[in-house]
Image (tube, coloured by chain):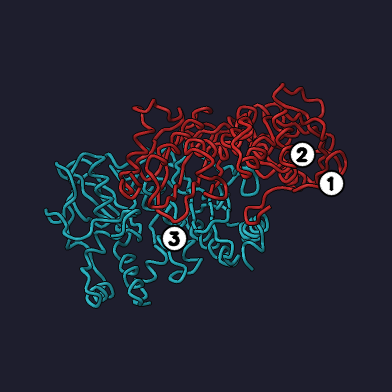
Chain colours: A cyan, B red
Amino acid sequence: MSVTQTGEFGLIERITARLGPAAGGRSGAGVLLGPGDDAAVVAAPDARVVASTDVLVAGRHFRRDWSSPVDIGHRAAAANLADIAAMGATPTALLVALCTPPDLEASWVDGLIDGMVAEAATVGAGLVGGDISASPTLTVSVTALGDLAGLAPVTRSGARPGDVVAMAGRVGYAAAGYTVLSRGFRSPRLLVEAYRRPEVPYHVGPAAAMLGATSMIDISDGLLADLGHIATASGVAVDLRRNVFSLPDQLRNAADALGVDPYDWVFAGGDDHPLVATFPENTLLPEEWRLIGSVQVGSGVTVDGKPHAGPAGWDHFRAN
Amino acid sequence: MSVTQTGEFGLIERITARLGPAAGGRSGAGVLLGPGDDAAVVAAPDARVVASTDVLVAGRHFRRDWSSPVDIGHRAAAANLADIAAMGATPTALLVALCTPPDLEASWVDGLIDGMVAEAATVGAGLVGGDISASPTLTVSVTALGDLAGLAPVTRSGARPGDVVAMAGRVGYAAAGYTVLSRGFRSPRLLVEAYRRPEVPYHVGPAAAMLGATSMIDISDGLLADLGHIATASGVAVDLRRNVFSLPDQLRNAADALGVDPYDWVFAGGDDHPLVATFPENTLLPEEWRLIGSVQVGSGVTVDGKPHAGPAGWDHFRAN
């Protein structure tokens, strides 16, 4: 059955039915008023709310023949939840605006919603509202809200020369998976799955805020590009160390087979959504964090002291 | 210059430059951290945040040959701010996810942003963040946040038999303007302008909450359709009085000229975004509110005791 056959209100009812207590009460604890009214009401315990929006466009951010609707729901939620975590906040709620071609199967929407709800549930957040419209282009716009629990937000502008640069989560895997899929392959599974569903270590975000992180960012446009944002906002230089990135055999082998420099995936791939933060030099970091570089006087981002020769990152208006 | 020529980051810089203190400091007072980081931080003074999302798709919710980009910015903001007001809350912030065809003029985006910022400024809200992507379909997804100032949210479910139904703002004007434009005319100006830029009485929303409104809704799908949501959610019937809607001459004359029943615009048109609320019978209502009907035992929405024969409202997957 297509979304046109269910109709706008039929589709909204169908979605809402997947969210309610009957579906396992997966809404977050902070949801004071969920879907079904003009707006939702979400707890903001410390009298501030963190908010971020990301949009995914079919054919550009995802392909229906490469990922299941549940995968795409996970990815759409993760891209937004990671932005909240990168401020040092804990996500509390998601809203989604879905534009669908009239002939889209309603069951595809079910899968998308299930994926979003499942991803949000990993951090205790609920899907609290949304909007639906027909459109020639399948588009998923998500807004995430979060709570700072009394801490100052960790911005991009606080890195200081002498700080260490640390990363939590994987990088390069999803970009490798994307390349594998774009060449018509369906394996290695590790890489393809990393592209389909990012594994974001959300909890390290608030933990980094408590550890005194001086800056933090979610890597969505590539390590070099996103660390460039920190360098610019903080007025510093960032130097990364190439040999600290351990590349699993599947990634090395795929790079060999495809004739790609695996470090292009590491330095320019964004779809894994690891968190990268800077910390004062002597900070004792939990084992989720891997030291990947240092903050220095100057500007720009280098690798082992030199500019990286490969692609720099992703511009959503230009092909790379 | 097209958005592809400015590039993603160039376009983001261009937008951000229009929002900053240099552009008049139009961000809301509650904006603790504005655009430029992974997420914004907005004040939520009473430890709750109201949140709603609405998406506008080119060719469906607006037409670039009918409305200027500034008009469309006003409309996109208004549709979302009205949802916040309809909960009894005061809007604090907007976020926007913009999908644009690669050949869209960057100056069009400038206009859109200016319209959104101007509309938000009327209620003291700021544009705090967003996302941009290329897409074949021009789409504007907006999320609005708001503050309840300690009051309970006014939902759709509290209407009780014996309550009065009151409306603040205009209804039918925008639908008339849409019909006029769709027949190839550009006047009467009153109607065309009403379609291009809704005049939403945002302040009556929080005021209604303080007056003890038992339910409230923003009319975006038409009076009958949206009051149907209140009737269903509250388990009551709503009866409207046809003769209380005063129709200006321009609207009557346009209806005559186009062979349309003007009450179809009044009862099924949604783009004016008036607020409709129910109040206990003896509530003394300020003059912004016009009594338009009553809440009764039963179900459904009637006009002068009978079902309305015309179109009922708007389904975003079906043509009307």
Q: Chain of mark 3?
A: A
A6 up-or-down from B213: above or below:
below
Who is closer to the viewer here, B156 or B198?
A: B198
Specify whether disc 3 shares its chain with disc 1: no
User: In the image, residue A127 lies at what x, y percent?
Assistant: 55, 53
Q: Chain of mark 2?
A: B
Who is closer to the viewer here, B269 or B282?
A: B269
Q: Amino acid at mark 1?
A: Pro
Q: Residue A288 appears in which quarter of the rendering?
A: bottom left
Q: Chain of mark 1?
A: B
A53 up-or-down from B17: above or below:
below
Q: Which dot, 3 or 1, sits closer to the camera?
A: 1
Tell whether label 3 touches label 2 (CB within 8 Å).
Answer: no
Q: Which dot, 1 or 2, sits closer to the camera?
A: 2
Q: Quadrant of the N terminus of chain A?
A: bottom right
At x 65%, y 42%, the residue is: B179
**In the structure shown, which secondary structural element does the residue marked by tag 1 occupy?**
loop
**In the structure shown, which secondary structural element does the residue marked by tag 2 occupy?**
helix
User: In the image, residue B26 lies at what x, y percent?
Assistant: 43, 28
- Sequence-earlier tag: 1 or 2: 2
Q: What is the residue that sits farthest to the left in this orientation?
A: A305
Mark 3: few/some/many CA within 10 Å (<14, 14-19, 20+): many
- Direction from residue A312 to residue B1 in the image, left or right: right
In the rendering, which numbered label is found on residue B263? 2
Q: Which residue is mark 3?
A: A75
User: In the image, residue B174 lies at what x, y percent?
Assistant: 64, 37
A241 up-or-down from B246: above or below:
below
**In the structure shown, which secondary structural element does the residue marked by tag 3 occupy?**
helix
